[in-house]
Image (cartoon, helix red, strand yellow):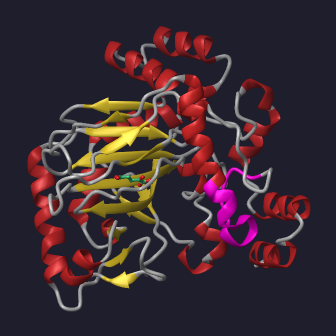
Amino acid sequence: MIRRLIYSLKNLVQGNPKLYSAIYNLATSNQDYKAQRREIDQYSSKFGGMWTDRKDYPEKLAQKIEAGDLTDAERVQMQTWRDDGYVIIPGGVPHDLIDQYKADVAAMMDKDPSPLLMTSADLPEPARYTHDNLKRYGSARIVDDYFFSEQSRNLLFHDSITRFLELAFEADPVLTQTLRFDYGSQQALHQDTAFVRMNSPMKLIGVWVALEDITPGSGELIYLPGSHNWEGHLFSGRFKHYDADRDGTEDLDKWHQWILDEAEARGVAVQKFAAKKGDVLFWHAGLAHGGSEITVPGQTRLSLVAHFCPEGVRPLYHYYKPGQRKYYRHGKYRYTNSYYR
Ligand SMILES: O=C(O)CCC(=O)C(=O)O
């Protein structure tokens, strides 16, 4: 109740970033982030990070190896994660799980009305899924289908995914959001910390699963290796996350441009993910990624994106949509969602 009150005060202090920041920090305060703040000089970001982002990472890695906690392959994964900000597990999800998921969601898409909601940059509000809407709106995506679909959860909580998340988070993962794309998103390069907001900003991992063999020109996923450590632009000069009311679209445009400028200055080239069905790519909270241009119109690019935080961290929608502050169980793991009850 008090947190809700404090959080709603934000609208009153929009124009004063310092005051906004103080209220925001109070409202979203949590032990996980406090622990990072206490040792903030260990991180290159002033917003903290995971153990792989810490300066004492080599010692921590050595301890884990010594304790037999990592296989040789996982050791390589952790190093890639630290250096590049993404890890690919080829064939991480079995095809039969994907087929069961696709059949389950296809049945929900065919229902009239469908229980599923969709969003798009061209839609002011989430809309009920219809086949027409999927074709009509660019970058349309179905949100949080795992709330209705056990097959979606079976896929996203598959061992290959949870194992990596547990290693990176050092905690059980919590599923907080999904976006299922039938076509490429063509979204500009961005860092999820701006839009997928957690009360511990860097404790967030994106998981991208190819639901079919992805073909050239379909708007493949793109990313900038190493960009998870770039932190030159803060919204309103202070914040890691974007707030349209507070920061305005000009600040957003500046940030998009800053990512491109930074890539050029550092000589980092955009990579395209030529994924095969079942391949999984994990991206770090700070990794700049997006969707490439669709040059073969009408070509599908079936993919599922999931955003996870660790136990102990919450998505910000738990604060601005207090009715969604609810967890559900899938085996030993928990999930929460911002759209459905
Ligand atoms: O799949 C894509 O094209 C990009 C998705 C994305 O950027 C995101 O979910 O944050």
Specify whether residue 219 is painted magenta: no
Residue nearest the observer in this picture, 224 or 3 = 224
Q: Is residue 323 above or below residue 265?
A: below
Residue 280 lies in quadrant: top left
Residue ID at (63%, 58%): 252
In the image, 69: left or right of 204?
A: left
Residue 309, percent across and down?
Answer: 52, 49
Residue 297, percent across and down?
Answer: 18, 60
Q: Main secondary structure of the magenta part?
A: helix
Residue 73, percent across and down?
Answer: 32, 17
Residue ID at (86%, 70%): 15
Residue 100 lies in quadrant: bottom left
Specify whether residue 245 is painted magenta: yes
Q: Is residue 207 above or below residue 22?
A: above
> How many numbered marks does the figure carry?
0
Q: Residue furthest bottom?
A: 113
Residue 103, percent across and down?
Answer: 10, 66
In the image, 110: left or right of 5?
A: left
Which image quarter is the C terminus in?
A: bottom left
Residue nearest the observer in this picture, 169 or 85 = 85
Which image quarter is the N terminus in?
A: bottom right
Residue ID at (34%, 16%): 71
Residue ID at (47%, 25%): 84
Q: Is residue 162 visible?
A: no
Q: Is residue 66 above or below residue 313?
A: above
Residue 282 lies in quadrant: top left
Instruction: Give the extent of the magenta segment.
Output: 239-253
Q: Is residue 274 visible?
A: yes
